[in-house]
Image: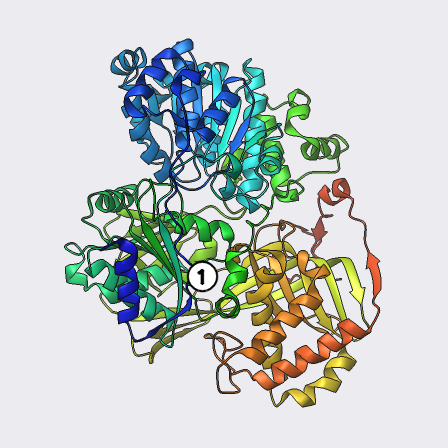
């Protein structure tokens, strides 16, 4: 029986599952190849290919390789499992055959991807005449260079490697700043730079990488080289524009219309359940694995993946079980054990976060189960692409979560599957990042501002240079002896904390954003299926001490947010309501922690912050503010607790935002309700990254559409009670229940204003260079002591420091 038929039978046998979307099977597609005699590759490389691929290369591979060998930068955007890694691997070996000193840099967004490709490249090297002999003499010829490489192994790699597999983090921290002392040979001979899974470079991470790649180009020019760039991705909209913005170079695109790869039969289902989607998804995934299928079950979060694992496998059976959990924060050894287990089929079910979306070779996955819908088209097709690889048959089952957006798409599945890939957001105008990257570029140029290559680094860093030269920009980053250390490439915030067990064994790491949500004092923290209690957090050493915990309880943090409106940029004033984009300060702090038993009973509570500092995020967003007169008129219609209706609107806006702007990562934005200093109630959507990436500003133009979608979700949800359900207004962590009736009244009133009133439009011009200037220093009003940062009390006399006035 085929994989698709077996999956169909298992779904039909589960009485708790209802099929909501059942499109036809996608048929098998044979590949289209170009004979090797037409290839411009070196004869020795062609000889290798004749043994491995006697029919030749797929059409898109041939076209892309020919483009790269002409010295043109190329981006390849073809389906998953279309052999994209060969497109940069073969030009590498061509270069090694033609030039004994040539070097190449392969960049991957995750260490696991680099490790996977390392084995393949070394195997290829051993089979290509000429290269094999050099590889035998120099085992370091092709090497990884990332945080997982032991310190004693790094010097031999620097001295002997000609092909480096790394990530942007290590390129920034371990290579660029030491280019003149340790890497001059490598950069002087650099011929090829490959950027794998280029769609991963978006948001803060992508913005940092864009500057890192410009710094790489600056250093190559210093050493006399000009490498060709090649990028790959299966899920990227407008790949040429994205890569040109990411690198500052011109690119040629080889897109889906050129794809000649072989594709297996695959089938999609969307199913719904009256049970909690965690339980239904876990039950389905386990049933599929019990029938001998290899299953990858994608979960909404790290916590969810760990909880599903714990509820599937008893602690004493973890080692012998065929079930594992895979997420960020695992050690390299833990990740490699799971990847190898999938290849050998000793592991048949993995509960994973998005960490396994990308193209790591994990063998033949039969079925992907998405527990909760992916909220970007990139994630949807990357996840679906983990099955049916290499011409094999596969299936994907989507199970909507109990959230407004999943509820919306479960009612409109054709709309979900018909969407294009979302545009990738980069914000080179992010002030914090621009200043940090400029400081790094200056250090790499010999600490001389006048020696940096502004033509390569771009106009944004040229603006920073002008402001520095004029004496208008004096951020602390410019006076750091090691600015590279201060830059968090992935988040723009604080550096990560190490997770250490009671016997001083390091088991992983976590950033402060997740620390506040998962790893606060007294938290039960799960890691690889094992449970730990957080004993203490040592901020000065960025260390979290854990002790083993054998309880099956869970802990829940209760967080509050405060919003400070710093400056409005664009505003549409309708009189009763106002829509505006603005610069914001978002402060999030822990107010209490609850511990609950598996039955949901609260067994312990820790009030207060437990010593956790607030998480402060300067960012940008869009707000919907209600005038006092409007709120006073409407409040009596909203019941005894009108704020609950406001909180329900916030949840709907946050959940449905991707339906009006195009899919986006839900982790890239957030929401809040707060009262302005003008006493107006307001709902905020804001970018969840430092200084923003111009994401939630899209809600300004489409607020009317967002209100309409929220109203539809409330009025068409099938739940029977006024309190609603998690698919519409109910919030699992809210203290006060909401009301569908009150929420609909509020949304209808807002919709009436937005559709019947012509707004007064205003805009404040933002001078980017002026905004780069440091805020004027503040002094204590009591003793005159100069204040730094955002202190609550003066360090000299102890006087409470008032917050700067909000706009």
Figure colour scheme: rainbow
Q: Is 562 placed above or below 84 here?
A: below
Query: Quarter of the image containing the N terminus?
Result: bottom left
Q: How many marks?
A: 1
The quarter holding residue 318 reads: bottom left
Position in image of residue 24 (x %, y %): 41, 58
Q: Nearer the viewer, residue 672 or 379?
A: 379
Position in image of residue 746 (x %, y %): 67, 80
Would you name the residue on which mark 1 appears? 373
Q: Secondary structure at mark 1?
A: loop
**For the point 53% across and 17% down, which residue is it?**
70
**For the point 29% across and 30% down, which residue is it?**
119
Is residue 718 found left or right of 526 in the rendered image? right
Q: Nearer the viewer, residue 576 or 473?
A: 576
Query: Quarter of the image containing the C terminus?
Result: bottom right
Q: Residues within 10 Å of mark 1 (few under 14, many from 20)?
A: many
- Let me know if residue 802 appears in the view: no
Q: Nearer the viewer, residue 429 or 142?
A: 142
The quarter holding residue 156 reads: top left
The quarter holding residue 99 reads: top left
């Amino acid at each position: 029986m085929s994989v698709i038929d077996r999956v169909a039978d298992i779904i039909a046998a589960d009485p708790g599952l209802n099929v909501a979307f059942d499109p036809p099977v996608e048929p098998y597609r044979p590949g289209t190849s170009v004979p090797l005699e037409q290839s411009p590759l070196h004869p020795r490389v062609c000889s290798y290919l004749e043994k491995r691929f006697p029919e030749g290369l797929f059409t898109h591979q041939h076209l892309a390789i020919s483009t790269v060998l002409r010295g043109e930068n190329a981006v390849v955007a073809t389906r998953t499992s279309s052999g994209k890694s060969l497109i940069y691997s073969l030009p590498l070996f061509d270069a090694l055959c033609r030039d004994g000193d040539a070097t190449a840099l392969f960049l991957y967004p995750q260490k696991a991807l680099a490790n996977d490709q390392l084995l393949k490249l070394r195997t290829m090297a051993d089979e290509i005449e000429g290269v094999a002999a050099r590889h035998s003499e120099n085992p370091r010829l092709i090497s990884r260079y990332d945080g997982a490489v032991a310190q004693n192994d790094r010097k031999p790699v620097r001295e002997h490697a000609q092909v480096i597999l790394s990530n942007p983090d290590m390129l920034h921290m371990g290579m660029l700043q030491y280019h003149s002392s340790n890497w001059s040979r490598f950069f002087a001979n650099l011929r090829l730079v490959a950027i794998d899974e280029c769609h991963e470079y978006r948001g803060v991470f992508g913005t940092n990488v864009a500057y890192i790649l410009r710094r790489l180009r600056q250093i190559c020019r210093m050493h006399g080289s000009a490498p060709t760039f090649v990028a790959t991705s299966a899920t990227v909209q407008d790949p040429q524009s994205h890569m040109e913005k990411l690198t500052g170079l011109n690119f040629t695109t080889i897109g889906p219309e050129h794809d000649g790869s072989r594709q297996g039969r695959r089938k999609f289902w969307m199913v719904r359940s009256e049970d909690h989607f965690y339980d239904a998804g876990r039950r389905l995934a386990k049933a599929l694995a019990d029938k001998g299928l290899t299953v990858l079950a994608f979960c909404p979060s790290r916590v969810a993946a760990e909880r599903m694992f714990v509820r599937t496998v008893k602690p004493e059976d973890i080692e012998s079980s065929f079930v594992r959990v895979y997420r960020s924060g695992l050690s390299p050894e833990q990740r490699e054990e799971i990847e190898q287990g999938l290849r050998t089929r000793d592991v048949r079910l993995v509960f994973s976060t998005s960490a396994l979306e990308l193209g790591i070779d994990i063998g033949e996955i039969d079925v992907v189960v998405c527990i909760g819908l992916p909220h970007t088209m990139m994630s949807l097709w990357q996840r679906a692409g983990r099955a049916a690889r290499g011409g094999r048959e596969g299936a994907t089952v989507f199970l909507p979560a109990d959230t407004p957006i999943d509820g919306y798409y479960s009612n409109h599945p054709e709309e979900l599957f018909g969407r294009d890939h979302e545009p990738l957001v980069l914000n080179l105008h992010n002030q914090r990042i621009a200043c940090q990257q400029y400081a790094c570029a200056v250090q790499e140029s010999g600490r001389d501002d006048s020696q940096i290559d502004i033509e390569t680094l771009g106009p944004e860093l040229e603006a920073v240079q002008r402001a520095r030269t004029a004496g208008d920009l004096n951020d602390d980053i410019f006076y750091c002896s090691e600015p590279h250390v201060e830059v968090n490439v992935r988040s723009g915030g604080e550096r990560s904390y190490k997770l250490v067990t009671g016997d001083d064994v390091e088991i992983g790491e976590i950033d402060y954003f997740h620390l506040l949500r998962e790893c606060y004092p007294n938290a039960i923290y799960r890691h690889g299926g094992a449970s730990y209690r957080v004993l203490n957090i040592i901020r000065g050493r960025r260390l979290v001490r854990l002790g083993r915990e054998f309880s099956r309880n869970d802990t829940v943090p209760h967080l509050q947010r405060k919003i400070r409106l710093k400056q409005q940029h664009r505003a549409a004033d309708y009189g009763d309501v106002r829509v505006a984009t603005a610069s914001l300060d978002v402060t999030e702090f822990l107010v209490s922690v609850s511990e609950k038993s598996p039955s949901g009973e609260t067994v312990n509570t820790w009030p207060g912050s437990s010593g956790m500092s607030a998480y402060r995020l300067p960012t940008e967003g869009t707000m919907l503010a209600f005038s006092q007169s409007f709120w006073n008129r409407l409040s009596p219609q909203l019941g005894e607790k009108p704020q609950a209706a406001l909180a329900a609107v916030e949840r709907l806006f946050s959940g449905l935002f991707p339906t009006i702007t195009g899919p986006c990562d839900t982790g890239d934005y957030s929401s809040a309700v707060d009262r302005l200093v003008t006493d107006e109630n307001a709902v905020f959507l804001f970018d969840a990254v430092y200084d923003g990436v111009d994401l939630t500003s899209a809600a300004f133009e489409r607020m009317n559409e967002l209100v309409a979608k929220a109203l539809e979700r409330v009025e068409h949800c099938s739940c029977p009670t006024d309190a609603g359900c998690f698919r519409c207004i109910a919030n699992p962590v809210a203290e006060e229940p909401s009301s569908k009736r009150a929420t609909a009244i509020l949304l209808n009133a807002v919709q009436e204003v937005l559709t019947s009133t012509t707004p007064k439009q205003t805009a404040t011009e933002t001078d980017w260079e002026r905004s780069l200037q440091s805020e004027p220093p503040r002094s204590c009003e009591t003793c005159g002591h100069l204040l730094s940062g955002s202190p609550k009390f003066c360090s000299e006399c102890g006087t409470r420091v008032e917050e700067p006035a909000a706009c």
